[in-house]
Image: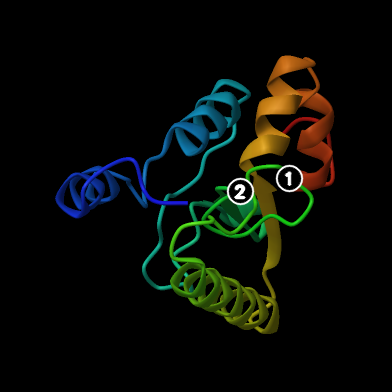
Amino acid sequence: MTDIWSKEKRSAVMSKIRSKNTKPEITLRSFLHGRGFRFRIHRKDLPGKPDIVLSKYKAALFVHGCFWHYHADCREGRVPDTNSKFWQDKLSKNIARDLTHQQKLTDLGWRVIVIWECELEAALKNNKMDTSLTRITGASCP
């Protein structure tokens, strides 16, 4: 199957995709802040620059997009039909890099929590965000 856009158009579209401050990240940050949690974002001194860092709980949160981090249990976590070899290599490297960063954080004594984009959407849709806090803090409220 061929791409519906020209190479130039596809390149322009892909260049607009953000790696920081994505909608799922902002949604989770707003939710946490509204519940009284205080955190730092994208700490450069930690491996992988976690999306959200809750120092009080020694927790590093990564909000992963299902496509970019190849979420196997999700419909979005798949290799595109176009240029499959490139995407398979890219997504494999992303997974390897994620695991390396997570292991380094664990070795430093941090709890690493990966929150998938689809998981966050489902929790919001079903009003189950409060129960998800237990996974982050070990308690329901700060």
User: As displayed, is residue 6 above or below residue 47?
Assistant: above
Q: Residue at x 50, y 60 (%)?
A: 50
User: As displayed, is residue 47 above or below residue 141?
Assistant: below
Q: CA distance from mark 2 to mark 1?
A: 7 Å
Where residue 96 appears, as percent x and y from the top left, is 59, 80
Q: Residue at x 75, y 26 (%)?
A: 123
Tell me which amino acid carries mark 1. Answer: Cys
Categorize mark 2 by other alpha carbons within 10 Å: few (<14), some (14-19), many (20+): many
For numbered disc 1, what is the local secondary structure? loop
Q: Is residue 68 left or right of residue 4?
A: right
Q: Residue at x 58, y 75 (%)?
A: 92
Instruction: Compare marks 2 and 1 and give the one earlier in the sequence.
Output: 2
Categorize mark 1 by other alpha carbons within 10 Å: few (<14), some (14-19), many (20+): some
As drawn, the label of residue 66 is 2
Along the line of sight, the residue nearer the viewer: 55 or 46 = 46
Residue furthest left as drawn? 8
Residue furthest front as drawn? 1
Where residue 43 appears, as percent x and y from the top left, is 40, 62
As drawn, the label of residue 2 is none
Along the line of sight, the residue nearer the viewer: 50 or 36 = 50
Q: Which residue is mark 1?
A: 74
Mark 2–mark 1 CB contact (< 8 Å)? yes
Along the line of sight, the residue nearer the viewer: 33 or 21 = 21
User: As displayed, is residue 135 above or below residue 125?
Assistant: below
